[in-house]
Amino acid sequence: MSKLVTDVICPFCGTLCDDLEVEVSDDGKQILEVRNACAIGATKFLHSQASDRIIRPRMKQDDGTWKDISYAEAAKYTAKILCEAKKPLMYGWSSTSCEAQATGHMIAEQVGGIVDNTATVCHGPSLIAVHDVGIPSCTLGEVKNRADRIVFWGCNPAHAHPRHMSRYSIFPRGYFTGKGSKSRKIIVVDPRPTDTASLADYHIQIEQGRDYELLDALRVAFKNGPLPDVVAGVPKDKIYEVARLLKSGRFVTIFFGMGVTHSLGKNHNIDEAIAVTRDLNEYTKASIIPMRGHYNVTGSGQVLGWQFGFPFCVDLSRGFARYNPGETSSNDLLLRNEVDACFVLGSDPGSHFPNKSVQEIYKLPSVCIDPHITPTAAVSKCHVPVAFVGVEVGGSCYRMDNVPIESRKVVDPPAGMLTDDEFLKLVLAEVMTIKGAA
Ligand code: SF4
């Protein structure tokens, strides 16, 4: 016997697909089949059932082996290293619920920590650009129903957000886009011939790192201004052609990824991409959306914004919130040896940070809260496995277009396993005891 759980949210990428169906055993313990998800999303659900999963917190011993400890002991250790540190780094937050993020931020306030999320190594420049010039954006639902010109700039959703194209941007039949992909013209700007580029009507093979120049050239082309023969490796005739194509659309949406946020120019590239969108609104309707990676990195920015006024790189070490990316960002702090404890939840800097930062994490008192065995868990002193948000516990998440969606519990976590919010509440209680505020 089995039962079907419908309208399940996929807790993997920022597309946050909300139409999954998961067949579970009658006792609610076993996932039998995942329908509608892409291969990455389905694997996340099925992998949560792995037989070699770590189900108890563990502490690294002097000889490098691990010893199982209780959640209470792990909470005590976590509270101790955070309270003893002058400037603890509390990094990650992008693969957990908004509720757990809010609890974690209460701990950070008590211990005077730095709260930073994965935007620091992905869409941080986009957030900085939004502070500078604002953002004309829309929801993915509007894209599906209205957009007839789609630009993918410096991103490859065929691999990173596999169902984005079928649910929202290329193939779906919407209210004003009834012929699906035939209703839309697709433009991909990427130095490489990617799988997304193979689906495009126009692949603009830009020179690596020349995004600012091409964006600027498009703004000139919108006004039929003069251009050099070639800009960023693209012949001017092609630039004028793409400019005409965009102006002739009824609704343009530009999706952009780390190919723009982390190439030469960084946040200034995004300033310029937003300026292109703003200019297009003189001729038609246009919007721009960052392709956010982790399923709730957008939520982390939202919750930090409500609580402290800034979306990442929040420094609470002086008793009030400061924000200065470049100074208060995780890698800068780690590379300057400025933090004296490291707490990671819902992210894997061991895989994504520069080697020198990871070496610094290895030297520090550290805790990694993650259901998986990750490179970060391997270099941390304490590893606390928790239930998978969106699989074994529900919680609020924000899609890449800032739409909040409630994720669902599908199966029970292993017996005795805490959720990250429950574990953080234990840590908060310990912190309050140490601070004498309980
Ligand atoms: S596109 Fe993203 S959210 Fe949708 S099923 Fe795949 S991994 Fe999950």
Image (cartoon, rainbow, N blue to C red):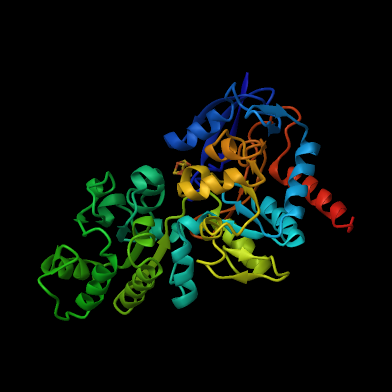
Say whether residue 309 is visible: no
Say whether residue 124 is visible: yes
Q: On the image, which quarter does residue 217 sit in?
A: bottom left
Residue found 39% across the figure and 65% down from its top: 288
Residue found 71% across the figure and 33% down from its top: 57
Pinpoint residue 195: horizontal percent, then vertical percent. Answer: 27, 44
Pinpoint residue 244: horizontal percent, then vertical percent. Answer: 19, 70
Residue found 44% across the figure and 77% down from its top: 133
Q: On the image, which quarter does residue 138 sit in?
A: bottom left
Pinpoint residue 262: horizontal percent, then vertical percent. Answer: 38, 59
Residue 281 lies left or right of residue 101; in this view the side is: left
* Above or below, comparing residue 191 to residue 385 in the picture: below
* Above or below, comparing residue 125 to residue 93 in the picture: below
* Above or below, comparing residue 39 to residue 138 in the picture: above
Residue 332 lies left or right of residue 111; in this view the side is: left
Quadrant where the N terminus sits is top right
| Number of numbered markers | 0
Pinpoint residue 202: horizontal percent, then vertical percent. Answer: 20, 56
For the residue pair 296 and 177, the one nearer the viewer reads as 296
Residue 330 lies left or right of residue 244; in this view the side is: right
Residue found 69% across the figure and 23% down from its top: 27
Quadrant where the C terminus sits is bottom right
Q: On the image, which quarter does residue 330 sit in?
A: bottom right
